[in-house]
Amino acid sequence: MKIFDIRCDFCNTTWEGMANEAGEPVECKHCGKEAASIISSCNFTLPGYDPAYPTAADRWARRHEIAARSRG
């Protein structure tokens, strides 16, 4: 069994629960009706994923370059 988000459209609730696969019907723990297991979205970012500044180090260097110009 795997951990999925379980969504009940009847009582409009979502929680984490166990299921064998996504889309498998699960009993809602709130109202007892049939709910569906869904794949939850991931919350992550790729560091440095900015077209203007390919890496965090480039961003740091650019900020310091601008600051040095404004001082001199």
Image: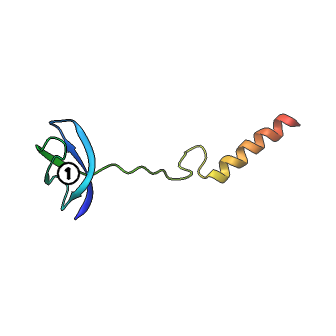
Q: Tell whether 44 sits left or right of 28.
A: right
Number of marks in picture: 1
The colour mode here is rainbow
**Nearer-the-camera pick, 11 or 56:** 11
Image x and y of residue 5, in percent: 27, 50
- From what the image shows, is residue 29 above or below residue 3? above
| Residue at (24% x, 39% y) in the render | 13
| Residue at (72% x, 49% y) in the render | 61
The N terminus lies in which quarter of the figure? Answer: bottom left
**Nearer-the-camera pick, 29 or 10:** 29
Q: Tell whether 9 sits left or right of 44.
A: left
| Residue density around tag 1, few if under 14, some if 14–19, many if 20 or more, within 10 Å | many
Residue farthest toward the right in the current orientation of the protein: 72
Q: Disc 1 marks which residue?
A: 37
Examine the image and state in which quarter residue 62 appears. Answer: top right
| Residue at (66% x, 50% y) in the render | 58
Amino acid type, mark 1: Ser
Image x and y of residue 52, in percent: 59, 43
Residue farthest toward the bottom in the current orientation of the protein: 1
Examine the image and state in which quarter residue 68 appears. Answer: top right
The C terminus lies in which quarter of the figure? Answer: top right
Q: Secondary structure at mark 1?
A: strand
Image x and y of residue 28, in percent: 16, 46
**Nearer-the-camera pick, 45 or 1:** 1
